C-alpha cells in the first residue's frame, strides 16, 4: 500500500467525526463537507511522518478551516441579512442539512450557537461536545488556555440560558422523559452503534455523558462486546460524548432491549439469561450516563 493510499484510508476512518465537528461548528451540511474536503487536501499535501496522533492533527485542521469559514461568514453578515429579508430564508443553501443538525444539537442551541463569536463557538463545540483540551483549542484561536476556558464558559452560559431547563426556565428531571422516548433513544443508540454511524450515535448522547463499568464487567468485557473479529476492552470509565461515541461506534454486539428496574436499557443475555446490564440515565432527550454491570445481584431485568 502506498503512503497516499494509507493516508486516504486513515482519513476515511476519521471522516464521520471530522464532519461532525465541522457540522456543529458551521451549522450547514454543505459547508461541513467543504471543510472536510479542505482538510483532506491539506493532509495530502503535508508531511505527517512526525505526527504522533493523526486524529488529533486532523481535528485541529478541520477546526481551523471551520473557524476561518465562520470568520468569513461574519464579514458577510449584512449580505446574509439582506438575502433573508428578500426571500424569506436565512441565506444558507442546505435546509435539509440544517434540519439534521437541529435534530442532533437542538433547535434552541443551534440558534444560540449562531449568535456566538467564531472563537466562542469553536471553544464550546470542541471542548463541550468533543472533549478537546483547552491547551489544544488555545493554539487554534491564538489565545492562552485560560482565555480559551473563559470563551467556552461564556458560550456555555449563553447556551444554558436558552434551554427550557436552564436558569431562566422550568426545571426538568429524568422523570420528564417518557418511557417511550427512553426506549426510542436506546434503540437509536444501539442501531447507530451497530451501523457505525458516529454522527447519529453522537446525537443520542449528552456532551457530558459518563460510562462506568463495574469490575466484573471490566473483567469479562472481551466476552461481552467485540469489534469485528477482535475483542474490545471495557474501560472502568469513559467521559464525554466524543470518547463514548468512539467506544461504541461500529461494535459487533448483540444485546437485548430490556427494562432494568423498570427503565429502558440493554442486556447481554446469551440463552435468554441476563449476564450484563447496560443501565441508561436520561435528561432532556439525551443519554447522560450508561452503567455497565455484570454484578446483577438484586437487579430486576425484564427482556423485551
Image: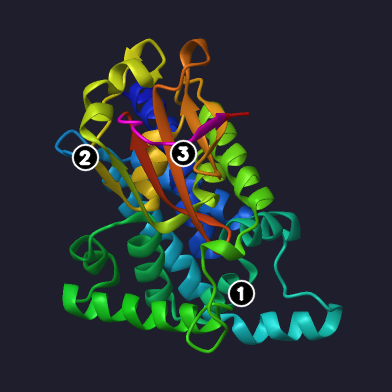
Local SS, label 1:
helix
Question: How many angstroms separate mark 1 from mark 3 (CA)?
Answer: 27 Å
Local SS, label 2:
loop
Q: Specify which label sits upstream in the sequence, 2 or 1.
A: 2
The residue that appears at 41% across and 64% down in the rendered structure is: 125
Q: Specify the farthest residue to the right.
A: 87
The residue that appears at 74% across and 86% down in the rendered structure is: 82
Q: Specify the farthest residue to the front.
A: 298
Tell me the quadrant of the picture where the N terminus can be found. top left
Q: Is residue 216 magenta?
A: no
Residue 66 seen in the figure:
yes
Local SS, label 3:
helix
Which residue is the site of mark 2?
A: 53
The residue that appears at 84% across and 83% down in the rendered structure is: 86
Question: How many angstroms separate mark 2 from mark 1 (CA)?
Answer: 34 Å
Q: Specify which label sits upstream in the sequence, 2 or 3.
A: 3
Is mark 2 in CB contact (under 8 Å) with mark 1? no
Magenta range? 295-302
Q: Specify which label sits upstream in the sequence, 1 or 3.
A: 3
Which residue is the site of mark 1?
A: 108
Q: Which mark is residue 235?
A: none
**Picture layout, residue 216 above or below residue 207:** above
For residue 117, which quarter of the picture?
A: bottom left
Amino acid at each position: 500500500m502506498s503512503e497516499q493510499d494509507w493516508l486516504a484510508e486513515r482519513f476515511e476512518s476519521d471522516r464521520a467525526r471530522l464532519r461532525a465537528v465541522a457540522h456543529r461548528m458551521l451549522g450547514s451540511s454543505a459547508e461541513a463537507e467543504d471543510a472536510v474536503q479542505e482538510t483532506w487536501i491539506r493532509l495530502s499535501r503535508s508531511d505527517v511522518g512526525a505526527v504522533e496522533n493523526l486524529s488529533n492533527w486532523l481535528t485541529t485542521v478541520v477546526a481551523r478551516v471551520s473557524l476561518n469559514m465562520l470568520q468569513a461568514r461574519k464579514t458577510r453578515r449584512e449580505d446574509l441579512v439582506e438575502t433573508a429579508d428578500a426571500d424569506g430564508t436565512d441565506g444558507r443553501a442546505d435546509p435539509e442539512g440544517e434540519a439534521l443538525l437541529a435534530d442532533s444539537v437542538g433547535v434552541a442551541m443551534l440558534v444560540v450557537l449562531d449568535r456566538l463569536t467564531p472563537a466562542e463557538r469553536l471553544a464550546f463545540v470542541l471542548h463541550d461536545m468533543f472533549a478537546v483540551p483547552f491547551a489544544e483549542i488555545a493554539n487554534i484561536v491564538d489565545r492562552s488556555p485560560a482565555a480559551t476556558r473563559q470563551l467556552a464558559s461564556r458560550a456555555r452560559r449563553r447556551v444554558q440560558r436558552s434551554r427550557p431547563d436552564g436558569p431562566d426556565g422550568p426545571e426538568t428531571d429524568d422523570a420528564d422523559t417518557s418511557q417511550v422516548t427512553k426506549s426510542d433513544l436506546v434503540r437509536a443508540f444501539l442501531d447507530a452503534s451497530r451501523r457505525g454511524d458516529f454522527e447519529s450515535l453522537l446525537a443520542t448522547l449528552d456532551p457530558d455523558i459518563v460510562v462506568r463499568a463495574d469490575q466484573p464487567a471490566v473483567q469479562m468485557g472481551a466476552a461481552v462486546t467485540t469489534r469485528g473479529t477482535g475483542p474490545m476492552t471495557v474501560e472502568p470509565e469513559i467521559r464525554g460524548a466524543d470518547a463514548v461515541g468512539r467506544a461504541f461506534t461500529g461494535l459487533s454486539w448483540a444485546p437485548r432491549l430490556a427494562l432494568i428496574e423498570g427503565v429502558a436499557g440493554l442486556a447481554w443475555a446469551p440463552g435468554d439469561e441476563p449476564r450484563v446490564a447496560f443501565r441508561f440515565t436520561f435528561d432532556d432527550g439525551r443519554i447522560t450516563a450508561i452503567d455497565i454491570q455484570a454484578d446483577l445481584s438484586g437487579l430486576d431485568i425484564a427482556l423485551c
